[in-house]
Amino acid sequence: MTGQVLCRLADLDATGAKEIVLDRDGARFPVFVVKWGARIFGYVNSCPHARLPLNWRDDVFLDISRTYVFCANHCAHFDVATGKCIRGPCKGQGLTPFPVRIDGDSILAAET
């Protein structure tokens, strides 16, 4: 997956984030990328509390203020830059990082 194009930077304009479902050895592997200022972060789309997807709606991963990554199932709030849960039932746990990099106007998987 290294070097695989996940999406374009412009794909993040509407909601600040984008879900991508990859194939990992024949199994679905959902990840998402999120824009935070000029930086892009990638995480596996799985809440550490119950291993459910964070989003209920396509590409909506940020809270209403676009300050935190938000789990729609448990109202957990995660720091965008670190993935650490700062509020909710999984406080102290964190999202699993998914390394990404920017190449021109594309976001690529950095290493997996």
Image (tube, grey):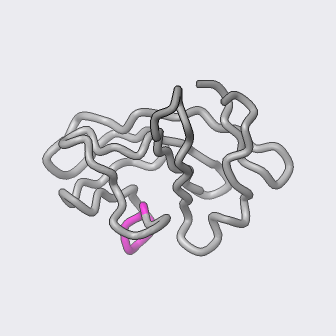
Estimate the x, y position of residue 103 in percent, counting from the top left. 82, 43
Q: Is residue 104 left or right of residue 76?
A: right
Placement of 63 over or under 82, stated as above or below? below
Q: Nearer the viewer, residue 49 or 68?
A: 49
Estimate the x, y position of residue 48 in percent, counting from the top left. 26, 38
Prevailing secondary structure class for the magenta stretch in the rendered image: loop
Q: From this viewpoint, which residue is outermost toward the front?
A: 26
Instruction: Examine the image and state in which quarter residue 101 appears.
Output: top right
Placement of 17 over or under 3, stated as above or below? below
Image quadrant holding the C terminus, namely top right
Q: Nearer the viewer, residue 40 or 67?
A: 40
Residue drawn at x 46%, y 34% as measured from the top left: 27
Q: Nearer the viewer, residue 63 or 109?
A: 109
Image quadrant holding the N terminus, namely top right
> Which stretch is magenta?
61-66
Placement of 91 over or under 11, stated as above or below? above
Q: From this viewpoint, which residue is outermost toward the left?
A: 89
Report the number of discs. 0
Residue drawn at x 49%, y 44% as measured from the top left: 31
Q: Is residue 20 left or right of residue 91?
A: right
Residue drawn at x 52%, y 55% as measured from the top left: 19
Q: Is residue 105 left or right of residue 90?
A: right
Estimate the x, y position of residue 104 in percent, counting from the top left. 86, 49
Q: From this viewpoint, which residue is outermost toward the right?
A: 104
Estimate the x, y position of residue 7 in percent, counting from the top left. 69, 54
Residue drawn at x 67%, y 47% as measured from the top left: 6
Q: Is residue 29 magenta?
A: no
Q: Nearer the viewer, residue 23 or 77?
A: 23
